[in-house]
Amino acid sequence: MENNSNKAIENGAAEVEMTFLDHLEELRWRIIYSLIGIVVGAVVCGVFIDFLIDAVLLNPARKVGADLQNLKPFGQVFLYFQVAIAGGFILSIPNVFYQLWRFISPALHKREKKYILSIVIFSSFCFLFGIGFAYFVMLPLTLNFAAHFGTSTIKNQFAIDEYMSIIFSVMLGAGLIFELPMISFFLSKLGILKPSFMRKYRRHAIVIIMILSAVLSPGTDPVSQIVLAVPLVMLYEVSIIISKYSVKKLE
């Protein structure tokens, strides 16, 4: 029994006593594993690239009646590569989060490490839910405003690269914003964030959220801005609950 205890202590000490170079080596391999996942995802997306572009990414423009143009000789070639890589990243996001949490796991307690799979699933769900929210709510509002703004004498036509830049930036940005609950969990575990702090500055956070909603939604319609702000406020409240739960676990 005593030998087993000594071995456990030695294993724990070996795990804690990782040098700076060891951490760099671990980070390097996690990045490599993440890139492999993205490449595999990009290959899968490449197989279905026509469907992704025609039926998915061009659909928001089609619904609002926006005209798209390719103004560069190899514009569509680069577009296909861009879509494949971005799609590969989104498709492999569970693997990316898994590698991230595996890198962070040495800083967690042993009882917390067993929740890594659940954390990865929840992180992936938040990210994908954010992308879905951007695709079905934010992009239609944004593109509808851009396509019909101004005088009818001037026809609004969009360059395909600018259009795709808006699509990717809004979707990936929303995916990252919807990671707020997981960021709250992680910072609370490190003791950096407290639920009392988030409650104290709730009003300030709401003001920032309203400003952010106004930026993400270029339309002047206040209803559109509220539609974007409500989920962000809900995410903030959920983050407070998660922070409170995380702090209790530390006590």
Image (cartoon, rainbow, N blue to C red):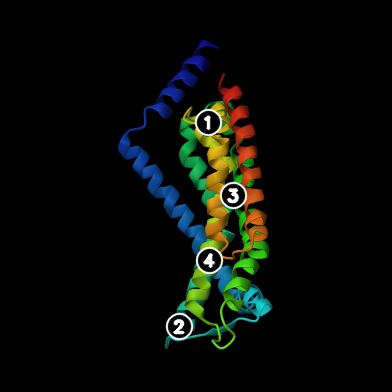
Q: Residue at x 66, y 44 (%)?
A: 234
User: Label 1 belongs to which residue?
Assistant: 188
**Which amino acid, mark 4?**
Phe
Query: Which quadrant of the figure has residue 74?
Result: bottom left
Tell me the distance, in whole angstroms, between the alpha carbons under discs 1 and 4: 30 Å
User: Residue 92 versus residue 21: which sits nearer the camera?
Assistant: 92
Q: Nearer the viewer, residue 221 or 47?
A: 221
Question: Marks 4/3: CA distance?
Answer: 15 Å
Q: Is residue 65 left or right of residue 174?
A: right
Instruction: Tell me which label, 1 or 4, sits earlier in the chain.
Output: 4
**Image position of 242 (left or right of 201):** right
Element class at badge 3: loop
In the picture shown, does residue 55 fall above or below 87?
below
Pointer 4: what residue?
Answer: 168
The mark nearer the N terminus, 3 or 2, is: 2
Crowding around mark 1 (Cα neighbors within 10 Å: few <14, some 14 to 19, many 20+) is many
On the image, which quarter does residue 112 sit in?
Answer: top right
Q: Position of residue 223 (x, y in %)?
A: 67, 59
Q: Residue furthest top?
A: 2
Write down the residue under mark 3. 178
